[in-house]
Amino acid sequence: MLLLTIESSCDETAAAVVRDGRKVLSSIVASQVKDHAVYGGVVPEIASRKHLETIPVVIDEALHTASVSLENIEGIAVTRGPGLAGALLVGVAVAKAIAFARRLPIVGVNHIEGHIAAILLEREVAFPYVALAVSGGHTHLYRVDGIGRYTILGQTRDDAAGEAFDKVAKLLGLPYPGGVEIDRLAAGGDPRRISFPRPLLHDGSFNFSFSGLKTAVLNHVRKNPPQGDEQYLRDLCASFQAAACDVLVAKTLLAAETEGIGRVVVAGGVACNSSLRAEMAREAAARGIDLAIPSPSLCGDNAAMLAVPGDFYLSRGITDGLSLDATAVWPL
Ligand code: KG4
Ligand code: ZN
């Protein structure tokens, strides 16, 4: 099927045209980062308004780039949740309007389901695989037995990993969004200079906790402020990043070993982190595990990723109809 997909769960307005759930003909992402940066984080009301302004342009651009017209589209997949209610509503309302006008089948897709399936747009990964979804809102480990067949193995008890990156960046006075800044500064830092805690590392579960790590950084910085010492700032970033990545890598690979699964997928915005990618690759190789991480453009929020589950459901006649509604809290 030729699908139009729409994503508006947080601060990216995105649309894509994808054939048969695998071939991306276009993927347009309009970021609102600049609109939220002055507030140091995403402001839900601003996000909704920006989505409203941008979404028609992004959809036109996706169709134009793919060289297809709306008449050729055979179905629509849209992020139904989880996310910011007002932001989700914009995407869902537009998707339903197009579906109604063109008499197209429509399906609401879980945002996390999109993230952990995104890799299939780039390469095949046989089922089952273990997936780490690691973003600003989520840190979840799943066993994936097929599209629509997910078993949750563990999740964060407090902050998501991306949230911890962003909060640590903020307390270090770095610009929003902080994850990328920490990644950049850490590249020139010594990850062994400060020994931050690795929460729940040896508790045997597949759960995570990042709020204690963030507090440990805060306490350390209060006692030892960077005061313009650039190298110390880099070391702080590298030391925090190493603590966060150590836990993410260890728990993910332990989950794969415990499940007896030799394939691991890492997805979501934090999967862009260079240290996480490198450490996960090194440790997976040492254990003979096949590791698949999407290209950075498919790790962050995008609409193309929705086409993998979207096509799977629509081509089996699984649709939502026009009663589809945004669902801010929607566990996968
Ligand atoms: O998946 P995503 O774009 O949106 C959500 O669904 O949350 O993830 C955004 C998160 C933010 O917390 C951002 O700081 C983090 O991903 N992030 C990174 C990097 N790039 C994005 N964190 C660490 N290192 C990066 N390079
Ligand atoms: Zn996301």
Image: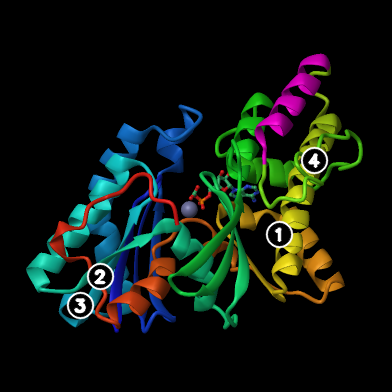
* Horizontal side of residue 264 vs 25, given as left or right: right
Q: Where 282 sits versus 233, above or below?
A: below
Question: Label 1 belongs to which residue?
Answer: 252
Q: CA distance from mark 2 to mark 4?
A: 42 Å
Most extreme residue toward the right, as rendered? Answer: 193
Q: Is residue 212 magenta?
A: yes
Look at the numbered disc 2 and give the secondary structure of its residue: strand
Q: Residue at x 43, y 60 (%)?
A: 302
Q: Earlier in the sequence, mark 4 or mark 3?
A: 3
Residue 185 picture location, percent across and down: 75, 41
Residue 257 at what x, y percent from top left?
76, 68
Tell me the amino acid under the disc marked 4: Arg
Residue 137 vertical placement versus 263 (above, below): above
Counting residues from the N terminus, which is met first, the one under dot 3 or under dot 1? Answer: 3
User: Residue 287, located in which quarter of the rendered image?
Assistant: bottom right
How many C-alpha atoms fall within 10 Å of the one at disc 4: few (<14), some, or many (≥20)?
many
- The image shows residue 126 at horizontal and vertical percentages of 59, 83
Q: Which numbered tag is attached to residue 69?
A: 3
Q: Please name whichever residue, 73 or 267, is drawn nearer the observer in this view of the structure.
A: 267
Look at mark 2 in the image and give the residue it sits on. Answer: 76
* Number of the front mark, 4 or 3: 4
Residue pictured at 83% horizontal, 65% vertical? 283
Three-letter code, disc 1: Thr
State the CA–CA distance, disc 3 to disc 1. 42 Å
What's the magenta bit mostly, secondary-structure-wise?
A: helix
Q: Secondary structure at mark 4?
A: loop
